[in-house]
Image (tube, helix red, strand yellow):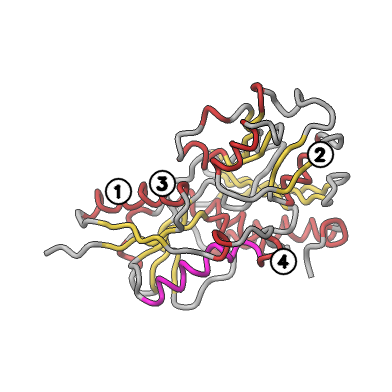
Amino acid sequence: MTTTLRVGTRGSALAVAQTTTVADALSGATGRPTTIVTVRTEGDVSTRPLAQLGGTGVFAAALRRALLDGVCDLVVHSLKDLPTAPEPGLVVAALPTRADARDALCARDGLTLAGLPAGARVGTGSPRRVAQLLSRRPDLEVVGVRGNVDTRLASVADRRLDAVVLAAAGLDRLGRSDAATERFDLGDWPTAPGQGALAVEVRAGEEDLVAMLDDPATRVAVEAERRVLALLEAGCSAPVGVHAWWADDELRLDVRVYRLDGSASLSSSAAAALPTPCTSDAVEVLASQVARELLDAGAAELAGVGA
């Protein structure tokens, strides 16, 4: 009898949808049946802002415990929710091909950001998005929000808010692409490190279980993004946008650090010809160049990042 693979996930509609995609791909590649195991996390239960809960790790910790305890054989994370520090005993063995990394505005009446009226109420739970919104439109009233995608979209539908900003990949995975009234260009509006990518984590020594799902080009790009965040010593409460992408065989990396109120920002860019796969040392050189330039320019004082 073929052993069923138990795939751990958060219980939100988005988490289950993206985990089901990974489970189906794994079954197709290995011929083994899969079953979804939902795990309740602190981030799902609490209504407090993520920054107060300790940031990205509030979604990952319970999933990682379930994996280490043998409740499941692998877990699927949104990579942007995964802390940059590795977890002892676990390995991110697969990073499937990345989806749309952009942020999307979901506004009433089909409005764009430029078209929102003065004083419009825009919801987000991300300090980075707050800073980006205010850097473009300082007249807006930015409102802190929590909840799943449907809950946030409902706040626009019933006119409690004029708009919300969400990850485009999440909308696409839920079949809600039509809710986006504008997708922001990554050159002007870099997003969270790893946004749009999924991470498949297993126990150390069991990497072969999911290795066939790994996309080397995605892995190099998101590792560069996440390494910059680690070098800046920044977490989800820091207003930092990062975007790495491939142009032929060259990896290009753009980073922007914002003052929380959006009144100022610092930018740095770098590029290098890298193979795929490539060594972590090559990624480190690129990420270090950008991080050092930002810290030397005053990123620590601007946004509270860095040593």
Of label 2 and label 1, which has the lower sequence position? Answer: 1
Which residue is under mark 3? 17
Q: Which residues are magenta?
A: 54-69
In the rendering, at what x and y percent does residue 28 appear? 24, 48
Q: Residue at x 15, y 62 (%)?
A: 2
Mark 1 or 3, which is nearer the eye?
A: 3
Q: Quarter holding the C terminus?
A: bottom right
Of label 1 and label 3, which has the lower sequence position? Answer: 3
> Three-letter amino acid code at disc 2?
Glu
The extreme left residue here reads 1
Q: CA distance from mark 4 to mark 3?
A: 32 Å
Which residue is under mark 2? 141
Q: Nearer the viewer, residue 95 or 294?
A: 95
In the rendering, at what x and y percent does residue 166 appear? 61, 41
Looking at the image, residue 222 lies above or below residue 175: below
Mark 2 or 1, which is nearer the eye?
A: 2
Residue 291 is marked as: none
Q: From the viewer's perspective, is 140 left or right of 281?
A: right
Which residue is under mark 4? 233
Q: Nearer the viewer, residue 158 or 239?
A: 158
In the rendering, at what x and y percent does residue 9 appear? 42, 59
> Three-letter amino acid code at disc 4?
Glu
Picture quadrant of residue 47: bottom right
Dot 4, how many residues are within 10 Å of its Cα: few (below 14), some (14-19), or many (20+)? some
Dot 1, how many residues are within 10 Å of its Cα: few (below 14), some (14-19), or many (20+)? some
